[in-house]
Amino acid sequence: MIRIDISEASRTGRLLSYAICLLIGSAVGVVAEESDGGKSVTKSMLQQWTGPYGGVPPWHLVRPDAFPKAFDEAIRLAKLDIDAITAQSDDATFDNTFLRLEDSARALNRLNALYGVHTSNLNVGPMADVEAVVEPKLAAYADELTQNEKLFARIETVYKSNQFKVLSTAKQRLVEKRYKEFVRRGAKLTADNKAKLSKINTRLATLFTNFSQNVLAEEQGHVTWIEKEVDLIGLPKSVVAGMAAAAKDRNRPGQWAITNTRSSMDPFLTYSSNRQLRAKVWTNYYSRGDNGDKHDNNAIISEILKLRAERALLLGYQTHAHWRLEPQMAKTPAAAMELMMKVWPKAVARVRQEVADMQKIADSEGSGITIEPWDYRYYAEKVRKAKYDLDFNEVRPYLQLEKLREAMMWAAGEVYGLTFKQTTGVPVFHPDVRVWEVNDSSGALIGLWYLDPYARRGKRSGAWMTDYRSQENMGKIVAPIVSNNSNFVASSDGATVLISWDDAQTLFHEFGHALHGLNSKVVYPSQSGTSVARDYVEFPSQLNEHWLSTPEVLNQFAVHYETGKPIPAELVAKIERAATFNQGFGTVEYLASALVDMKLHLAGNVEIDPDRFERETLAALGMPREIVMRHRTPHFAHIFSGDSYSAGYYSYLWSDALTADAAEVFDAAGSYYDTKVSKRLHDHIMSVGDTIDPGDGFRAFRGRDVDTKALLRKRGFPVD
C-alpha cells in the first residue's frame, strides 16, 4: 500500500533551493524575553547555531510573534550576500558565483528551519497571523532572487562557457539545474511579465496559507464524542485508551474522542461495529474543507488553479502540469499518466472482487446493507480474517511504538553501519520530542535525528520528514539534522503505545527519508540527501518499509507488550500470505487522488468548480462508489498548501515502481541484510543526493533500467 507523507512541503534547507522550488516551511518555539524593542529576540533567532554537534536549533530562543521582523532582517542580509556576488568585477566562475550562492543566506536558512516547525508542529497562538505576513515576504524574495538580472547573467555565463565542460559531474549538474530553474522561474521574462509573475506568486503564497489554515481548523474543530461504553464494541483496548486520552486532553474525562485525523479515523472505521458512528466519523473526515462555511476551500482551490494555469502560460508552458514535470524523472504528464493508467484498471478490477467478498459477509450477517465507503475498512477486516485467518487485532499487541523505533535503528545499523544514542543535551520545541546522536561504525558523528511522534492541537495531520540542516562538506563537514514527525495517539498514564501494522509501515517509511538525509555524503548543500527529483524522493523511503517485515526485525522487536514473547511464527506467516490483500483499495484510493491532481493541472486556463470536477473526473474513470479519494480535493494539502506536490502526486507510484524492482534485488540475494547489496544501495542511492541523474543511480544499483512489471507483481495484480 502506498505510504503518504508531505516531507518536502515542510522540508527546510537551503533558502536558495526554497526560492527556486517555492516551498514553504513551518515551525514554532517557546517564548523568549523581549528587550531593546525586540531586537535581541530577532538577533537570537538569526544567530549562528551554537552548542554541540556543530550547533543545534535554538528552539528555546524563539518567539513566534517575532518571526515577521526576523524575516525582514534575514532577507536583508540575504540580499547583501547576493549583492556581493553580483558586484564582482571578475568574470563569473563556478567558485565566485555558484560556490558563493551555496554559502549565501545562511541566517535566512536557519530562521526558515525554526519557522517551519512552528507552522507544522506547533501552529497555535499567533502563528496563523504570522503566516499571513511571512509567506508573501518569502514569495516576494524568491521572485526577486530568480529575477535578478545581474545574478542570472553570471549563472548563464558559467552554464554556456567552456569552463562548464571541464567541471565535475556534480558541479555540472548543480550549474545546469540552477540555470534551468532560474529560467523556469521567469529569469528571461520581460520586465512587465516578471511583475505579473511576482503578483501571481505572492497571491499564491497567501492562498496556500489560507488553504492550510482551513484544513487545520477542520481537523481541530470536528470531534466525534462517545459517551456510552456500548459504542466502543469492537475497538481494540489500545484504540479505546487513545480515545480516552484525547477526551481527557479536551477536558471531558470519562468520555472518548475520535479526532478528525487519519490516525484517529482509520482504526475506528476498521473496528467499530457501530455503523451509524462509522458514517459520522467518515463524513467528518472526508468533508474537511468542503462544508460551505468559513473554512470551505473550494473558492481558494479554484483561484489557485487559475493562477497556476496563468503562470504556466506566462512561462511558456502548455499547462502547470507540463511546467512541474519538466525537471522530474517522468519529464512529461503523458509519461506519468501512462504509468498510472497501466495500473488503474487492474486496481479497479481488484476492488470489484474485494467488494464482492465483503458483500457476501454482510449478506450472511442478515444486515440488509449495501457496502458503503464507511463500511469498506470494517468488512475488509472480516474478509481478511475469513480468507487468511488473520485478525490484525492479534498483531497489534506486538507492535509497540518504542520497540519499533528500536527496530528501525537496529536495521539501519545492520544495513548502513549507523548507531543511535539518545541525547538530552540539546533544546527541543516540545516535551514530546526526543533527540538521538547518529554515528557511523567508526564512531564519527553522522548527524542528529529528532522524533516528534504524537498528535496534538496545532500539529498538522499525517507523517513527514524534515531536515533542519542539510549535510555539506564545503571546506568543513557539516552534519545533517533531520526529524520524523507523526500523529500517533498517545495513551494516558504512560501506558504502552501500540500501533497498527499500517502505522508501523508508515513509521519505517518516514525513517527512510531520514536515513536518506543522514547517509548523504556530498559537497554542496543544495544537492544533499533528499534534494532529488520529486518522483524519486519517495523511492528510498518506500524501500525502507521492507525491513519491517524481515524475520530479523520481527523476531527481536515485535514482542508482546505484556508477556515480552515474540510474535508467533504462524502469525507472521499469515501476514506474509495476506501481503497483497486489499491492494485494490489501497491502490485505487491513492491513484484516484493522483489522477485527479494531474487532470486538474492539465485542464489549463479555465474556471474550475473543484467539487464538480472531482465528481465528473472520477465518474469518467470508473471510480468504484465504495471508495473515495485518499485526499479529496478540498483538503488535498499535498497539492494546495504549496507547489511542491502539485501535478506530482503520481510520484509515489513512480517511486514505487523503482522500489518494487529494487526490492527484488534483496529478494534474489536471500536477505535484506546482504552486505554487497546494502553497499550498492548506500553508494548509488542513499549517499549521492542530487550529484548524479537519478536514473543513472538506479541503473548503477540495479544493473539495468527499471522493470515496471515488478510493481504489478508487488501488488498482486496481473502482469499481462
Image: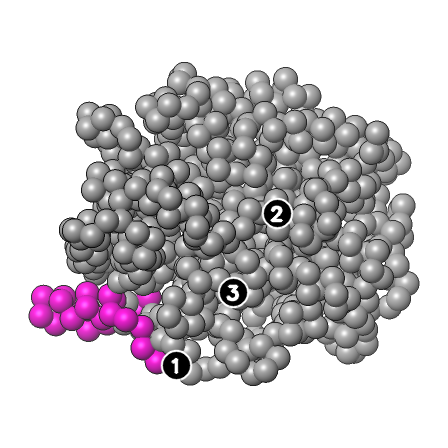
Q: Is mark 3 on a helix, strand or loop?
A: loop
Instruction: Determine if the magenta segment contains residue 234.
Output: no
For marks 2 and 3, give the one nearer the viewer: 2
Residue holding disc 1:
52
Q: 350 or 47, which lies in front? A: 47
Q: What element carries label 2?
A: helix
* Quadrant in the picture for the C terminus: top right
Residue at position x 27%, y 28% in the image: 189
The reply to whether the C-beta atoms of the residues labelled 2 and 3 are less than 8 Å apart is no
The reply to whether the C-beta atoms of the residues labelled 3 and 1 are less than 8 Å apart is no
Query: In the rendered structure, which disc, 2 or 3, sits on the residue that comes first in sequence?
Result: 3
**Percent x, y of residue 119:** 36, 54
Residue at position x 63%, y 19% in the image: 619
Q: Residue 185 carries which label?
A: none
Query: In the rendered structure, which disc, 2 or 1, sits on the residue that comes first in sequence?
Result: 1
**The disc labelled 3 sits on which kind of residue?**
Lys
**The disc labelled 1 sits on which kind of residue?**
Pro
Query: In the rendered structure, which disc, 3 or 1, sits on the residue that comes first in sequence?
Result: 1
**Percent x, y of residue 536:** 58, 46
Relative to 424, residue 301 above or below = above
For marks 3 and 1, give the one nearer the viewer: 3
Residue holding disc 2:
696
Q: Is residue 245 visible?
A: no
Q: Can residue 416 be seen in this view?
A: yes
**Percent x, y of residue 675:** 74, 68
- Looking at the rendering, the stretch of residues picked out in magenta corresponds to 26-52
Residue holding disc 3:
521
Q: In this view, does 316 lie to the left or right of 377?
A: left
The quadrant where residue 197 appears? top left
Q: What element carries label 1?
A: loop
